[in-house]
Amino acid sequence: MATPIKDVILKENAPVTILFDKHIEFLRDYGKDDNNFEFGMTDYLRVSGMYWGLTALELLDQTHSSPQEEIVTYIKNCQDPETGGISACLGHDPHLLHTLSGVQILAMYDRLDAIDVEAVVKYVKSLQQPDGSFTGDKWGEVDTRFSFCAVATLSLLKRLDAVDVDNAVKFVESCMNFDGGFGSRPLSESHAGLIYCCLGFLSITHRLDLVKRDVLAWWLCERQLPSGGLNGRPEKLPDVCYSWWVLSSLTILGRLHWISGEKLKKFILACQDTETGGFADRPGDVPDPYHTVFGLAALSLLGQAEIKNVNPTYCMPQHVIDSMQLSPQILRD
């Protein structure tokens, strides 16, 4: 007897339109109370959390509602004076993940002048290894996520020339699997989040010629379940965040039309919290800024009128990428 596909069932009363005002309220209020338990427990991802929330507000055309100078000052204070990297929170060690998030926020605000750019460049350069890979920080973990973070950060700073791009490309290529996907390291399992990171990396470095385009696009399409939601790898439940990782990857490959956009849109909208606003990973779960930004960004790729256009490579508003005159590679038919 065949094992049933792991999936969720959408309730008949699930929301079918975007709860615009509730999402704005949710994002404005989230994280304001520093006495809140969740606030204290999320120090380790504070700057990335700010990026998720602020990008979501920008996609909803609500950036003006955030205290920009206070945010800029906070990021500036998170830059480590010794290494040049940006940490998740004051007093924490710097990391590439939060360095990229900090740079993305400042790029949206057109305030890259607030940090020591050359120090950031030096930090990113120091993390490249002889095989072209990047570690996330001084502790040495290697992951293709960090390859993406490195080139995304440097491209936003217009300093991609600071690292050995050719060697970095060779490492990412070595992480490609028989199914067209990518893992965290060579011989690691294909995963939709890591596929996005590797495609984003190759998009920025203009080396999408290395990709098994249709083989990979087919693997990504197989992530769609009967509910319309997308999972990150076979036999997993659907999750709103994979709406972004898979859709952005298909967009970069020029294969967005290979899945049912209407079914996916129905699933994403069903993951909204009708009481508090925000998106959860699945219908009925607790919403958070992480799933909210990726739910909104996915809806943007699907053409949702109330949401600004998002760039599939950077997960930033398209108008910001245009104003910075960046041109990541996107495959077209």
Image: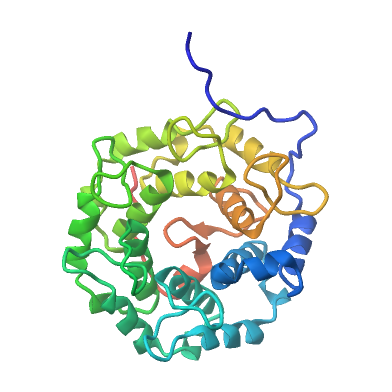
Q: Residue at x 32, y 76 (%)?
A: 124
Asked whether the viewer can see residue 271, the reply is yes
Compared across the picture, whether 121 is left or right of 169 comes to right
Q: Position of residue 125 (x, y in %)?
A: 27, 78
Q: How many marks?
A: 0
Compared across the picture, whether 221 is left or right of 164 comes to right
Asked whether the viewer can see residue 329, the reply is no
Q: Looking at the image, which residue sits at the far right?
A: 275
Q: Residue at x 50, y 32 (%)?
A: 224
Q: Position of residue 210 (x, y in %)?
A: 21, 49
Q: Residue at x 33, y 58 (%)?
A: 143
The image quarter containing residue 156 is bottom left
The image quarter containing residue 117 is bottom left
Q: Is residue 136 above or below residue 304?
A: below
Q: Position of residue 14 (x, y in %)?
A: 76, 36
Q: Position of residue 194 (x, y in %)?
A: 38, 50
Q: Is residue 162 above or below residue 304?
A: below
Compared across the picture, whether 21 is left or right of 306 comes to right
Compared across the picture, whether 233 is left or right of 185 comes to right
Q: Residue at x 47, y 76 (%)?
A: 103
In this picture the colour scheme is: rainbow
Q: Quadrant of the C terminus?
A: top left
Is 44 in front, or is 98? 44
Is 226 in front, or is 110? 226
